[in-house]
Amino acid sequence: MPMDMWLYNYAIKLHNARWEFYKSKSSKAYNPPPIPKIPKNLPCKSTRFILSCKSGKMGGVKYISPKATEIHKEIFLKILKLQ
């Protein structure tokens, strides 16, 4: 749940920034809001295709779906480094 809330709050900021850019009809380049740091002490991090848990009930679990692409794996590693 904490990661979901982090993502939800960032999605709202991202949407609002895009909406304001659209409404302004500005010739300036669009600048998205910075990605906030992921809350500390999350036992698990996940995306659509990858689940990684360092502690808690599922500590040590790491699952990578066969459908995960190399690009998806790279993005997941970036997510892990945001903490």
Image (spheres, helix red, strand yellow):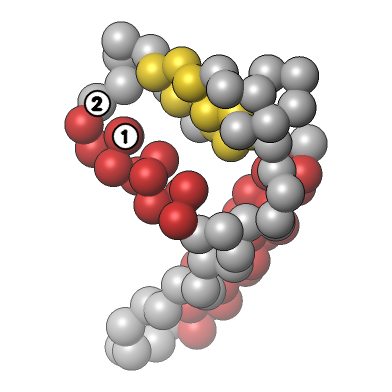
Q: Amino acid at mark 2?
A: Thr
Query: How far across and how far down the image is residue 78, in percent?
Result: 39, 52
As helix, strand or loop, the secondary structure at mark 1 comes to helix
Q: Is residue 22 visible?
A: no
Q: Amino acid at mark 1?
A: His
Judge left or right: residue 56 versus residue 37: right
As helix, strand or loop, the secondary structure at mark 2 comes to loop
Q: Quadrant of residue 26?
A: bottom left
Residue at which label 1 appears: 72
Query: How far across and how far down the image is residue 73, in percent?
Result: 31, 34
Real-space Cα distance between discs 2 and 1? 5 Å
Judge left or right: residue 39 versus residue 31: right
Q: Quadrant of residue 66?
A: top left
Query: How far across and how far down the image is residue 37, in percent?
Result: 60, 64
Judge left or right: residue 5 versus residue 16: right
In the picture as drawn, the residue positioned furthest to the top comes out as 66
Image vertical order of residue 61 relative to residue 53, above or below? above
Image vertical order of residue 33 relative to residue 11, above or below? below
Q: Quadrant of residue 38?
A: bottom right
Viewer-side residue, 4 vs 83? 83
Q: Are marks 2 and 1 in contact (CB under 8 Å)?
A: yes
Residue at which label 2 appears: 69
For the point 69% across and 36% down, which residue is it? 43
Image vertical order of residue 62 relative to residue 37, above or below? above
